């Protein structure tokens, strides 16, 4: 890119234009996954829609790659790129709550922590991820699985409208009434269709939840997993819970002599009337298996949603794999019991997220998120601090994935998938894939937005 383009950007945008020659470049080029080491031509900290349009136009005219960064948590590092222009939305982080209509208008660079904080003040919440540092943009556009999904649906199911800067630099509002094809594609299709500068969400009366983590000994993992599977099948939709393998971190609620021991666990979140939480969770504390430690009780929803942030600091090495699962067969459980206990780092984990309940109330073709028939989304999330351990940790994820894949659907949740999973895109969307390629042809025929789990435009 010529220096003229950079100087034009500097003249036209109000946010900072950070190039290799500028202070702060080393920080600005980084994303959450420390394994990603790319050198963009410029990172532009957009402050408004005009800034975003200017960068989109510059990328289109100059022919350089365009990366869009919300919270920067994409494991394959889609929020940056070598020689790319980066639309960094982190400064666009305002939230406006309308308590009467129970909606929130959220700017495209917000994290879930900002949304939780703003909505909790009104006793309201919507489905976000299970940590507070992830970006609302990337998480919602891919689907959005979290504590409230069984009761309130995916994050994308709560999206009411979105402002989008498309590849030609136009600003469109997408909703059920305006550009409904684009609105359909945004709800699960990822960052393929434009830069979403603002998202309007439906909120739910969720304030104090009853929940927290429960840890069980590893030698009871089979019993706990089977109990969890049966329990979730009949559990009220207000109950969120996911199963995990986890090395016990040094937290006060875990006996000191059990720190660093590999365990299994269930993280719970009862979002119904708080007084009904204790009986709702009793079977998991009394019947699922002998409890080593738990931290279950009433707490503000944002407290649960940020409770695990410390396990996932910026800069860890990441490699993840994912699947959708219709049924946890005995063979699948056996594969989990073989590989889960080998989890190599306190940061790494394997989660089994139920995506039934409210997620199943929406027809599979109503949004781009297609796997409404799956009961679970599983993720094998490898995270570790030292690059010298990359080979061993990546191997754990790959071996685990190879073992469970035959007992899973062909596709997986795009936000949990690796950069080497581009070959699985069609399977991720099933019957919705062809419609997605047609929407792509309408709004981004030349694939300007290609640094993502990419859906190429149909040519017909
Ligand atoms: P970014 O890296 O900024 O962006 C990811 C992708 O989305 C890119 O392709 C980007 O171009 C696009 N994008 C982002 N914002 C916009 C925007 N405003 N407009 C257009 N495109 C945009 N997922 C869950 O569903 N539930 C979880 O509980 C969960 N927990 C996680 C915990 C950790 C520690 C991490 C690392 C990830 C987690 N994820 C979870 C996965 C998460 O959904 C994805 O990593 C998601 O891509 C993060 O969005 P982001 O905006 O932070 O990422």
Image: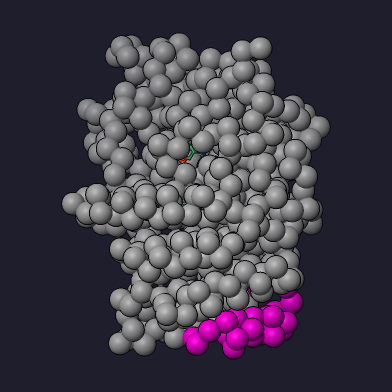
Is 33 inside the magenta-drawn segment? no
Residue ID at (44%, 68%): 337
Reply above or below: 287 against 234. Answer: below
Q: Residue furthest left?
A: 388
- Where is residue 378 shown, x and y percent of the image? 53, 56
On the image, the x and y values in percent for residue 64 come to 39, 17
Query: Foreground: 112 or 12?
Result: 112
Check residue 284 for magenta coloring: yes
Q: Residue furthest front?
A: 331
Name the residue rendered at 45%, 37% in the picture. 421
Question: As drawn, is 281 to the left or to the right of 74?
Answer: right
Q: Whole-percent x and y of residue 21?
A: 22, 27
Q: Is residue 310 visible?
A: no
243 vs 318: above or below: below
Residue 348: image quadrant is bottom left
Please name whichever residue, 263 or 177, is drawn nearer the observer in this view of the structure: 263
Direction from residue 164 to residue 30 in the image, left or right: left
Q: Is residue 329 above or below residue 187?
A: below
Q: Quadrant of the C terminus?
A: top right
Residue at the spot 73% in from the left edge and 71% down from the top edge? 234
Image x and y of residue 452, in percent: 48, 33
The residues colored magenta run 267-291
Q: Is residue 266 left or right of residue 315?
A: right
In which quadrant is the N terminus drawn? top left
Residue 277 figure quarter: bottom right
What residue is shown at x 52% (from left), y 60% (from top)? 332
């Amino acid at each position: 890119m010529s220096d003229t383009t950079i100087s034009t950007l500097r003249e036209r945008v109000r946010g900072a234009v950070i190039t290799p020659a500028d202070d702060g470049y080393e920080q600005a080029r980084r994303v959450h996954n420390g394994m990603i080491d790319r050198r963009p031509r410029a990172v532009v900290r957009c402050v408004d829609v005009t800034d975003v349009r200017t960068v989109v136009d510059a990328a289109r005219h100059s022919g350089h790659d365009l990366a869009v960064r919300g919270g920067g948590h994409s494991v394959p590092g889609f929020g940056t790129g070598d020689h790319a222009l980066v639309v960094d939305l982190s400064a666009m982080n305002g939230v406006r709550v309308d308590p009467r209509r129970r909606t929130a208008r959220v700017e495209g660079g917000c994290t879930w922590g900002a949304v939780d904080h703003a909505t909790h003040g009104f006793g309201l919440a919507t489905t976000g991820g299970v940590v507070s540092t992830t970006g609302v943009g990337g998480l919602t556009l891919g689907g959005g699985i979290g504590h409230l999904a069984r009761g309130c649906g995916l994050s994308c199911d709560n999206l009411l409208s979105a402002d989008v800067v498309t590849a030609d630099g136009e600003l469109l509002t997408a909703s059920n009434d305006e550009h409904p094809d684009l609105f359909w594609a945004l709800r699960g299709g990822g960052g393929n269709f434009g830069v979403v500068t603002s998202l309007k969400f439906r909120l739910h009366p969720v304030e104090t939840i009853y929940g927290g983590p429960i840890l069980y000994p590893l030698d009871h993992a089979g019993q706990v997993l089977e109990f969890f599977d049966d329990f979730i099948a009949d559990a009220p939709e207000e109950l969120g819970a996911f199963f995990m393998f986890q090395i016990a971190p040094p937290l006060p609620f875990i006996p000191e002599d059990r720190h660093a021991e590999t365990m299994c666990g269930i993280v719970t979140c009862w979002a119904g009337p708080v007084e009904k939480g204790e009986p709702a969770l009793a079977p998991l504390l009394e019947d699922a298996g002998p409890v080593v430690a738990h931290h279950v009780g009433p707490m503000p929803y944002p407290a649960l949603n940020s409770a695990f942030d410390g396990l996932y600091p910026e800069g860890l090495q990441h490699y993840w794999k994912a699947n959708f699962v219709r049924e946890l067969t005995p063979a699948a459980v056996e594969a989990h019991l073989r590989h889960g206990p080998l989890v190599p780092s306190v940061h790494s984990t394997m989660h089994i997220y139920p995506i039934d309940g409210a997620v199943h109330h929406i027809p599979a073709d109503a949004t781009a998120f297609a796997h409404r028939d799956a009961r679970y989304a599983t993720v094998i999330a490898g995270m570790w601090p030292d690059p010298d351990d990359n080979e061993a940790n990546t191997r754990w994820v790959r071996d685990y994935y190879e073992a469970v894949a035959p007992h899973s659907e062909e596709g997986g949740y795009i936000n949990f998938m690796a950069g080497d999973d581009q070959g699985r895109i069609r399977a991720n969307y099933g019957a919705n894939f062809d419609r997605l390629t047609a929407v792509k042809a309408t709004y981004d025929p030349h694939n300007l937005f290609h640094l993502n789990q990419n859906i190429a435009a149909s040519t017909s």
